[in-house]
Image (cartoon, grey):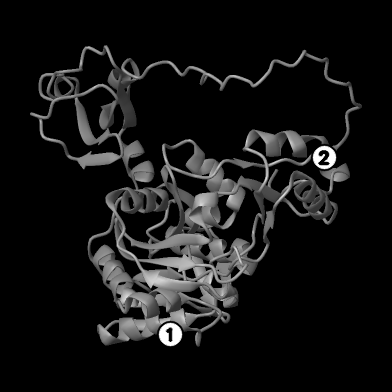
Amino acid sequence: MKLAILSRSPKCYSTRRLREAAQQRGHQVKVLGTVKFSIDLQEGEPDLYFRSIQLSQYDAVLPRIGASITYFGTAVVRQFEQMDVFCANSSIGIANSRDKLRSMQILSRHSIGMPRTTFVRDKKDILPAIERIGGAPVIIKLLEGTQGVGVILADSVKIAEAIIETLHSTKQNVLIQKFVAESKGRDVRAFVVGDQVVAAMRRVAQGQEFRSNVHRGGQTEVVELDDAYRETAVRATQIMGLRVAGVDMLEGKDGPQIMEVNSSPGLEGIETCTQLDIAGVIIDYIAAQVDFPEIDLRQRLTVSRGYGVTEIHVPDGSEYVGQTIAQSGLRDQDINVLTLHRGTAAIPNPRPSRTLEPGDRLLCFGKLDGMRSMVPEKTRRRRRPKVKDLPQQEEPQTPEIDEVSNDQSRPAGA
């Protein structure tokens, strides 16, 4: 296998270990500076140049994209994808995970634990937003902070309001999160490769510091995760669109609470703590994928006209409840069940004799016309009851403005 590691720091621990692990396994490997690429586009021939020389053929790419070059870095990864080179992490996955707001928005539609979070811009919305997530203390986070930088604990509502207003005045966008007190300055880092947690450690803050990051002096210890934490880490990684990730979770009273999914997790802390060859596991995984690559369903299955993939729900009272997959008649309608989701478990290629239960979700491939009638009409989610009903007020009329040219504080991409 010929492997390219995209990194601007060839001598840093993580890049060095990955290069050594690849060489020990007999692979060809080069560390290529991400910003040294040029992206050439023409009909039918996407291409890359490195230091103004046409790039030779690579079998796989392992991106180590720093936060400061996310836009250009993901563009380079995306170009490798267009050239049919296997990428350990996709460009979409990296972009999803790098923006804290975007990542929490994506996770929020799934049944996966996370601290209550809010995002506001108007000064008048700050206090109501803090009240909705449970009041002080709260955690205030810059959207693109790393290694604990830009994470602030506010003990009171007044302090939180002052900090948020100050950051807003400097054109910073921040998240406000409920403080999970029972975590007691601790969190868990699960290292996911493919569909497995290959290592895990607990990080413990020292002294008065509430942030447990190793870069902030946090101490580490090996931890054996139970199934709930393992499943949560793997699901979060897959939801983000990643294959290699470090998933940070708080140990909440209701189970794991996702803090962050890191697309370029460092190896030094977790390898030192666990004494495991995680770099080697990553290289072995990439080599296996190059030999037997996954198919992108979104690109491949749309080739067959009239066929596609959708999810069929089995609600309580459905005619399918109590029937086996064979008895359901789905195969007779040219519909194949790829995966059965039951609670947090995913059962790939379920047997025809498996009995369907209320709440099951079936990921199916087949004729769209046949499946369309089985998908219930989308209904609005019932909103949580309000603490008190406020009298409706007519919204103030404001003059129309050109938001792009006048509002310089808009979040990027808004």
Between 35 and 56, the residue placed more toward the observer is: 35
Give left or right: position of 383 versus 313.
right
Image quarter in which the C terminus is found: top right
Task: Give the class, few, some or many, for how many residues have Cα within 10 Å of label 2's Cα (few <14, many ≥20).
Answer: few
Q: Which residue is mark 2?
A: 123
| Name of the residue lying farthest toward the front | 207
Give left or right: position of 294 versus 218.
left
Residue 306 visible, this angle: no
Residue 43: image location, x then y, percent: 51, 56
Give left or right: position of 126 versus 73.
right
User: Which disc is residue 16 wearing?
Assistant: 1
Between 146 and 399, the residue placed more toward the observer is: 146
Label 1 and label 2: CA atoms lie apart by 47 Å
Residue 232 visible, this angle: yes
**Residue 43 sits above or below residue 382 on the image:** below
Task: Give the class, few, some or many, for how many residues have Cα within 10 Å of label 1's Cα (few <14, many ≥20).
Answer: some
Q: Residue at x 38, y 16 (%)?
A: 376
User: Which disc is residue 67 wearing?
Assistant: none
Identify the secondary structure beneath mark 2.
Answer: helix
* Quarter of the figure with residue 147: bottom right
Kind of residue sitting beneath label 1: Arg
Q: Residue at x 20, y 17 (%)?
A: 321
Between 139 and 193, the residue placed more toward the observer is: 139
First in sequence: mark 1 vs mark 2: 1
Kind of residue sitting beneath label 2: Lys
> Marks 1 and 2: which is nearer the front?
2
